[in-house]
Each structure stands twice: as structure tokens, then as C-alpha cells.
Image (cartoon, grey):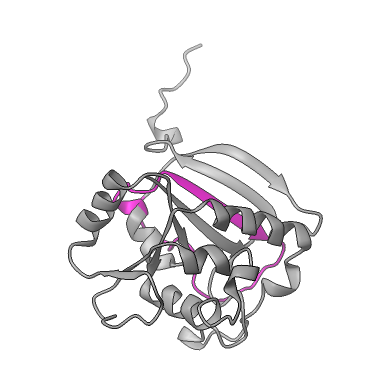
Amino acid sequence: MKLTTITNVSVDGVMQGLGLADEDRRGGFERGGWALPLVDEETMTRLGEVYGRADAFLFGRRTYEIFAAWWGAMADPEDNPVAAPLHARPKYVVSTTLTDPGWARTTVLAGDPAAAVRELKERMPGELQVHGSGQLVRWLAGEGLIDEMLLLTYPVIVGQGTRLFPADGPDGALELVDSRATPGGVTWQVYRPAGRPRYATEVPPRTS
């Protein structure tokens, strides 16, 4: 099973509270809902296609609860291209504190998360998608479990909030396999891990 992460970020890398004003106020974050005014019709159409190809979903606890409260509470989810696959397909949550998920077809991975995710990847076909879930994405990257990363970059500088990657963390090279932009200025970049980066200090000097 291919594990794909899908992350909405600002130009300065912020992923916190993109949807609603009160979605995530941790750390005194006051600029929630920064992505919503920039979502154009093409972005929504493509996102529907991305969700539609998923065979299962993997979440961190906080993102799962946000999704469950919004997409999980829809009266007619089958009429929505995002809500329909979220309702119909298996959902897995990496959490040691979530004990009674209310959303149907949800399984909590409370044991060794690395072993649990590897077992999912080995026994299931298709695509396992991670939406949001910044802490989980950083952990998956560190464990080498990500097969593909989709970044949706919105034309805005938020200026505060949690970034996708911290200022100090593990490094990694990426291969760009697809790139496009919507009429509203949202850019889509698809990356695959490409091993360890090369740095200038490691390149032998040229000889004349």
C-alpha cells in the first residue's frame, strides 16, 4: 500500500488552523481560516479526486477529531466528493488517548505505531492517505514510511502558527514528480523521497 501525505500549507510553511477561525488556537494562534478564502473551484475538484482514490485514511488524533466534527457530521455525506470516501472507507488513528471514536469504520492504532503502519502497508492494497496531521507526518517522514507527498501551497504568508516541518529536524532529499497551479494561485507539488540530501561541503572541489 502506498502511503501518501496531503498537506495544505502557506508560503511560509504554516499548516495550523487553515479551515475555520476556531479550528486550532493552540499557542495563541489567531489567524485561523487563512486557506478557505483562497480555495478555488479547481482546487476543490482536484481534492475530490484525491480523496476519491484513497483506499483508507490515517490520521493523528487532533486532525481526526476535526474531521469527525465536520465531515463526519454531514447529513448527506454521499453527496459530497470529500465526505463520501471519508465515510465509506476505513479510517485509522494513531493515538494513545483516543478510546471511543464515534465515527464509523474507525480503528485506533494504540500500540507500536511504526509496527502498525508498516503492517497496514504490507497487508492492504491501494493507497493510504494522511491528511493534515502535522505531528504524524513528521514522525512518518522520520521513520521512512512516506511514499509520496502532496503539498498544496496557498499564496499567503500567515506569519504565525505551526509549520509542517520544524526549524530543527531530520533532513531528506525529494524528487519532484508533478507540479501545477490553479487559476486562483494554489500550487500543487507531488514529491517522492529520494534518500539523503547532498550538501556543498560534501562535493569535492573542482580541480583546474
Determine if the magenta segment contains residue 166. Answer: yes
Q: Is residue 122 left or right of residue 194?
A: left
Q: Quadrant of residue 70?
A: bottom right
Taking the spot 47% from the left edge, 79% from the top edge, the residue there is: 68
Quadrant into which the N terminus falls? top left
Residue nearest the observer in this picture, 45 or 114: 45
**Residue 124 placement, left or right of 115:** right
* Magenta residues, dominant SS class: loop
Q: Position of residue 136 (x, y in %)?
A: 37, 64
Residue at 32 percent of width and 53 percent of height: 142
| Residue 14 in view, yes or no | no
Q: Position of residue 208 (x, y in %)?
A: 51, 11
Residue 167 colored magenta?
yes
Q: Is residue 92 above or below residue 33?
A: above
Can I make out residue 70 in this image? yes
Front residue of this view, candidates 110 and 72 = 72
Name, please, the residue furthest toward the top.
208
Over which residues does the magenta segment extend? 141-170
Of all residues, the one furthest to the left in this rendering is 111
Give me the residue at 54% from left, 51% from top.
Answer: 53
Q: Nearer the viewer, residue 169 or 63?
A: 63
Tell me which residue sits at (53%, 74%) in the image.
Answer: 16
Identify the image quadrant of residue 133.
Answer: bottom left
From this view, report whether residue 173 is shown above or below residue 12.
Answer: above
Residue 191 in picture, x, y percent from top left: 52, 43
Question: Where in the figure is residue 73, as x and y percent of width and height?
Answer: 53, 83
Q: Quadrant of residue 83?
A: bottom right
